[in-house]
């Protein structure tokens, strides 16, 4: 039996065909510094609610997948000494050993699919790391996007990654990458990446229609909805690039690789930007949560 625990509010909404938005937990424990992370987790849920959908933050606690965390459960996760970062490869072992951990985009997609959730909001997805031609470091997020039938709303991918290679892999895997309201692929803190987005759509109803059409065609996997950060909060790419290069150099010097690399780079950039990146980060996640709720509402409207 799958150890899946769906919070009553989420289960009721799903049973009634009402809009639900999945949220990941690695962003909380590994992507944002304490104590802002706790506040951010609660704020993102509040944004989903205000927009008219039910939030379902996903994590693994004592060998059970929780879809929808209460505040006590969120605190258990945040207060763990060294919370585990669970991707597709770790999920079954963690569950079978009755352990706890936060779910990455990949693991959250798997759990959300099990629960029957169709829309997921996050900040940035994992992708192909710089230097992947020698490290082979490609996030399982990309492979899972090609398998789980969810629309994932992110602010593109962070420029800590190799964005052209990330887009190439998504193309090879057949994952639609849809920029919202602009022709360029957004780069998380920056609206522009210099790279054309493969696809563009201008609103939640169109995105929901494309989601439905993909299912009707019987295509496996989901779509990446790349929602640019609001203009007033963006940090232009030329300001980010030196910090990214410095963070990557520190990681190379310290021999940081594998699972530890993304959290290390994010932490370094938070420090190097003296908190400026954090404000942008928090704002864009909420912006994504709002669009995800709107897409979930459009999908629910088609169902009724
Ligand atoms: N990118 C971000 N913020 C994050 C992450 C990625 O801008 O918090 C987290 C997400 O949980 C993502 C994971 O799924 O890192 C990817 O890690 P890896 O590259 O080890 O697959
Ligand atoms: Mn990796």
Image (cartoon, rainbow, N blue to C red):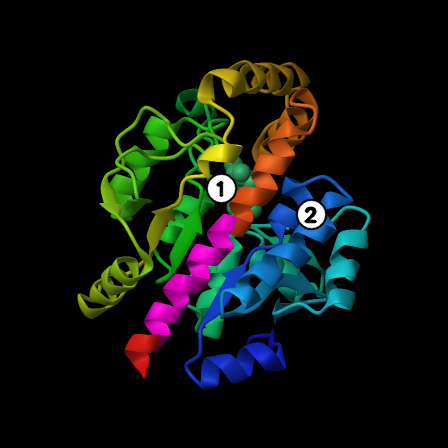
Toward the viewer: 215 or 304?
304
Which residue sits at x=52%, y=56%? Answer: 107
Characterize the local packing of mark 1: few (<14), some (14-19) or many (20 or more) Cα atoms within 10 angstroms. Answer: many
The residues tagged by marks 2 and 1 sit, at their Cα atoms, a distance apart of: 15 Å
Q: Residue extending furthest front? A: 232
In the rendered image, residue 292 lying in the magenta stretch gets the answer yes
Q: Does residue 188 appear in the picture of this structure? A: no
Which residue sits at x=67%, y=58%? Answer: 42
Which residue sits at x=49%, y=70%? Answer: 52
The magenta stretch is: 287-300
Q: Position of residue 282 (x, y in %)?
A: 60, 43
Which residue sits at x=41%, y=54%? Answer: 152
**Location of residue 262 with respect to 268 vertically, above or below:** below
Q: Is residue 39 left or right of residue 104?
A: right
Q: Is residue 170 left or right of residue 265?
A: left
Q: Position of residue 240 (x, y in %)?
A: 52, 20
Q: Position of residue 173 (x, y in %)?
A: 28, 45
In the rendered image, residue 182 lying in the magenta stretch gets the answer no
Characterize the local packing of mark 2: few (<14), some (14-19) or many (20 or more) Cα atoms within 10 angstroms. Answer: many
Residue indicated by mark 1:
124
Toward the viewer: 146 or 56?
56
Residue indicated by mark 2:
29
> Picture quarter containing residue 299?
bottom left
């Amino acid at each position: 039996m799958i150890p899946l625990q769906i919070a009553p509010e989420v289960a009721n909404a799903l049973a009634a065909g009402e809009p639900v938005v999945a949220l990941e937990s690695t962003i909380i424990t590994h992507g944002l510094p304490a104590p802002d992370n706790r506040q951010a987790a609660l704020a993102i849920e509040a944004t989903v609610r205000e927009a008219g959908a039910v939030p379902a933050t996903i994590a693994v606690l004592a060998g059970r997948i929780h879809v929808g965390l209460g505040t006590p459960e969120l605190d258990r996760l945040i207060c763990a000494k060294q919370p585990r970062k669970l991707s597709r490869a770790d999920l079954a072992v963690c569950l079978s050993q009755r352990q706890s951990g936060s779910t990455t985009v990949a693991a959250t997609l798997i759990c959300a699919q099990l629960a029957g959730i169709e829309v997921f909001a996050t900040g940035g997805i994992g992708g192909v790391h710089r230097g992947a031609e020698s490290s082979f470091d490609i996030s399982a997020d990309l492979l899972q996007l090609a398998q789980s039938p969810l629309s994932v709303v992110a602010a593109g991918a962070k420029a800590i990654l190799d964005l052209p290679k990330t887009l190439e892999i998504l193309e090879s895997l057949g994952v639609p990458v849809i920029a919202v309201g602009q022709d360029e692929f957004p780069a998380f803190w920056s609206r522009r990446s210099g790279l054309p987005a493969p696809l563009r759509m201008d609103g939640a109803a169109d995105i929901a229609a494309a989601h439905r059409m993909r299912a009707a065609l019987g295509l496996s996997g989901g779509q990446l909805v790349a929602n640019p950060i609001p203009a007033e909060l963006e940090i232009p790419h030329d300001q980010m690039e030196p910090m990214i290069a410095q963070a990557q150099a520190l990681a190379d010097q310290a021999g940081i690789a594998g699972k530890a690399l993304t959290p290390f780079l994010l932490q370094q950039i938070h420090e190097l930007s003296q908190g400026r990146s954090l404000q942008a980060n928090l704002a864009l996640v909420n912006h994504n949560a709002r669009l995800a709720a709107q897409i979930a509402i459009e999908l629910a409207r088609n169902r009724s």
